[in-house]
Image: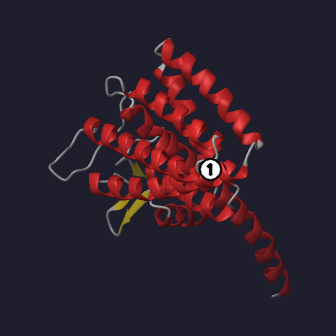
Amino acid sequence: MEEHSVNRAKSEPKNGSMQATVIAEMRRRIIKGDIEPGAPLSELALADEFGVSRTPVREALKQLQTEGLVEIRPRVGTFVTIPSRREITELFEMKELIEGAAARLLAQRGRVPEIDLIERNLREADEAVERDDRERYAELVQEFHDLLIAGADNSKLEAHYRMLMNQLAYSRLVNTSLSQPGRATQSDREHHLVLELILAKDGDSAEQVMREHVRASRRALLASLPISGGQGKFGTASS
């Protein structure tokens, strides 16, 4: 009896570790768009791929469901979530609030290291726009927003931001919004204006302009999304 308890105690940390591994890798794949929205996820296939039993895979998928990344349909299967246009709108409304607050907080902090990184980011973004390198510019867009959040120096705000970005699968959506003609150039200008206001320590205006920028991104995204089946759902983002 005692030996059985010891063996079980040894296996539990291992299962927990493997569950964390499955969660992290599946989250990465979904957020990066390696797995298409609506794609089915097989517990058996994933268990085989990761070399684990179905239990840590099942628990990992439950966690990803709480994060809004997968949908578990009893007696049907598990699928990568397909956000509706309404869900995207609601998530972007929260993004607007969070990033507006971040711009205000960063403006209050003065010349912190994140400012230098944002300035470098914008120089590289200008070059990417100039050569019409949308893929590189999309990466720099995400970096700009990440630096803004980091510069706010608020762990609670950052935690909410990370969860929101996961639910949006933001990497996938950036390319879609940038497919709108002229959006990359306008987005770059908006980023520059936000930084100018932050450097001027004008928190009120920085917040307002940042919120307007997020609204503009949302409009460009929704204008680019295909609608399938009349349900307001969309498939893989195009670039």
* Displayed quadrant of residue 117: top right
Q: Secondary structure at mark 1?
A: helix
Taking depth in this image into account, of 23 and 84 the one nearest to the observer is 84
> Which quarter of the rendered picture does the N terminus lie within?
bottom right
Q: Is residue 32 above or below residue 56?
A: above
Residue sitting at 44 percent across and 60 percent down? 68
Residue 31 percent across, percent down from the top left: 50, 45
Residue 32 percent across, percent down from the top left: 51, 40
Residue sitting at 41 percent across and 45 percent down? 212
Residue 179 percent across, percent down from the top left: 35, 27
Residue at far left of view: 230
Q: Is residue 26 visible?
A: no
Q: Is residue 239 above or below residue 52?
A: above
Relative horizontal placement of residue 110, taking residue 97 as reference (left or right)? right
Q: Label 1: how many residues lie within 10 Å, few (<14), some (14-19) or many (20+)?
A: many
Looking at the picture, the colour scheme in use is secondary structure
Relative horizontal placement of residue 34, taking residue 149 as reference (left or right)? left
Residue at far top of view: 131
Q: Is residue 197 visible?
A: yes
Q: Is residue 43 above or below residue 125?
A: below
Q: How many marks?
A: 1
Residue type, numbered disc 1: Ile
Residue sitting at 60 percent across and 48 percent down? 25
Taking depth in this image into account, of 211 and 162 the one nearest to the observer is 211
Residue at far bottom of view: 1
Relative horizontal placement of residue 232, taking residue 66 as reference (left or right)? left
Residue 119 percent across, percent down from the top left: 66, 30
Taking depth in this image into account, of 78 and 5 the one nearest to the observer is 78
Residue sitting at 49 percent across and 39 percent down? 171
> Which quarter of the rendered picture does the C terminus lie within?
top left
Mark 1 sits on what residue? 149
